Amino acid sequence: MSSYDVIIVGAGPAGTSASIHLASNGFKVLLLEQKKFPREKLCGEFISPECADHFLRLGVEVEMRAADPAEINETTFYSRYGKRIAVPSRWFGGGAAMGLSRARMDQNLLLRARSVGVDVHDGVVVNNPVEGDGKVLGIRAKVDEVEREYRAHITIDATGRARSLARRVKSADTRHARKSKLVAFKAHLSDSRAEPGVCEIYSYKNGYGGLSTIEAGLSNLCFIVTASEVRQAQSDPQLVMRRSVMTNPRAAYTLESARICSDWLSVALESFGRHKPSPAPGLLAIGDSASFIDPFTGSGMLMALESGELVSQLIVRHRDKLNRDEFAELARDYAKAYAQKFDSRLRVSSLLRRVAFQPRLAQGAISICSFSDRFRGWLARSTRATNTRNSLSAPFS
Ligand SMILES: Cc1cc2nc3c(=O)[nH]c(=O)nc-3n(C[C@H](O)[C@H](O)[C@H](O)COP(=O)(O)OP(=O)(O)OC[C@H]3O[C@@H](n4cnc5c(N)ncnc54)[C@H](O)[C@@H]3O)c2cc1C
């Protein structure tokens, strides 16, 4: 049996950021990830401008810039009936957004975690939380061919929408996902007619898609459709793309001459929104494992970085009490800070998603938004940080 201060499962932006902050503050941290890195990941790969400050604090700013990300200055929403509105990236706060593959971004963060002393193991699937006395005591996993038990004061579920630990803990939040009605697809493209510096979002019946430039002059196409449309197209991603995304005239134009230059990735989307940030005694959740914000906001990775930082700040603040089993106080503080920071934007995003899935409503919303820059700016910011008096909204210095 091995002991750590904190065990984190999942090395997406939430897990790596929490691990870097905690190790930099003197904690002994174990980070376990099921995939061998670098690995591709289904995502729009639009990195919101506010992430740059996180990269700076995490010590990966130079590595991210060295990966030569595309600079994205604007997001343009195209309705199915030809209307369009633009949202400049600076309205989100900061400068331009970045377009960078998840393979590269996540690898940079993982390497940084290793370099600040986090004990990192990739290629390790973790599905077994260890429980005792009504709380999570750690996990069991096979590392380097040896099945072992790892114990910690705190275990963090950073496994994204899989919620691999929270789902399996007996005493946890039992809200299980419904059967998936939506499926997302992603591929990298060359020769698309995407406008340089612009992330394009296309509305169509029962879904939406995004086309954005990434490094090496490629574009990333990521879209959501209903599961029934996927069945009707015999699960052929290119056929699904033509029958759904390309019913939007702008998408038909930008994608007409594009060539697919990666494997297609697909994933079922079970639910959006909020779970409990502290699903069980001894267990905390961050990133998508705590809540899944609607992808078209392009802010899921930001929330992952923010919640990784938030949980670390609280653990640092409660440092002296961790040994005395005072988890309940930490969990309460985290749940409160989490709600203050994220609930309002989750509500706004959920409302916008309902509109985005209905072409006529989306057309109406785009028309209304086109009248006022001020309203558009307010709406864009509403999908991001809330101004809160909570002192924890201040980042790690
Ligand atoms: C269609 C779509 C488009 C999106 N587009 C954007 C976008 O353009 N911009 C944006 O900011 N956000 C976007 N998002 C959201 C963004 O991808 C997520 O919010 C973000 O990846 C969450 O980070 P995370 O670290 O919480 O989880 P993840 O990035 O999902 O990382 C979780 C990690 O845990 C690992 N894991 C899972 N189960 C286990 C297990 N049992 N054992 C060990 N490891 C495990 C996984 O392999 C993974 O590496 C999009 C999401 C979707 C679905």
Image (cartoon, rainbow, N blue to C red):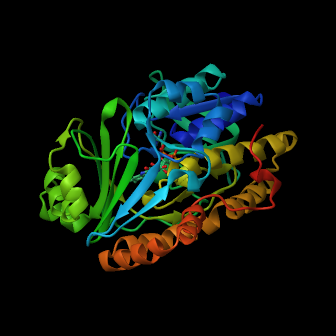
**Viewport quadrant of the C terminus:** top right
Q: Residue at x 38, y 70 (%)?
A: 356
Across and down, in percent, residue 11 comes to 52, 36
Where 112 sits versus 95, above or below?
Answer: above
Across and down, in percent, residue 297 comes to 48, 59
Marks counted in the figure total 0
Where 45 sits versus 234, above or below?
Answer: above
Q: Is residue 303 left or right of residue 371?
A: right
Quarter holding residue 205: bottom left
Across and down, in percent, residue 312 comes to 72, 42
Across and down, in percent, residue 151 comes to 66, 35
Q: Nearer the viewer, residue 372 or 349?
A: 372
Q: Is residue 168 left or right of residue 152?
A: left
Where 69 sits versus 205, above or below?
Answer: above
**Viewport quadrant of the N terminus:** top right
Residue 169 in view here: no
Q: Residue at x 54, y 24 (%)?
A: 111
- In the picture as drawn, the residue positioned furthest to the right comes out as 320
Residue 190 in view here: yes
Q: Residue at x 43, y 55 (%)?
A: 75
Q: Nearer the viewer, residue 236 or 137?
A: 236
Q: Is residue 391 left or right of residue 337?
A: right
Q: Nearer the viewer, residue 307 or 179?
A: 307
Quarter holding residue 23: top right
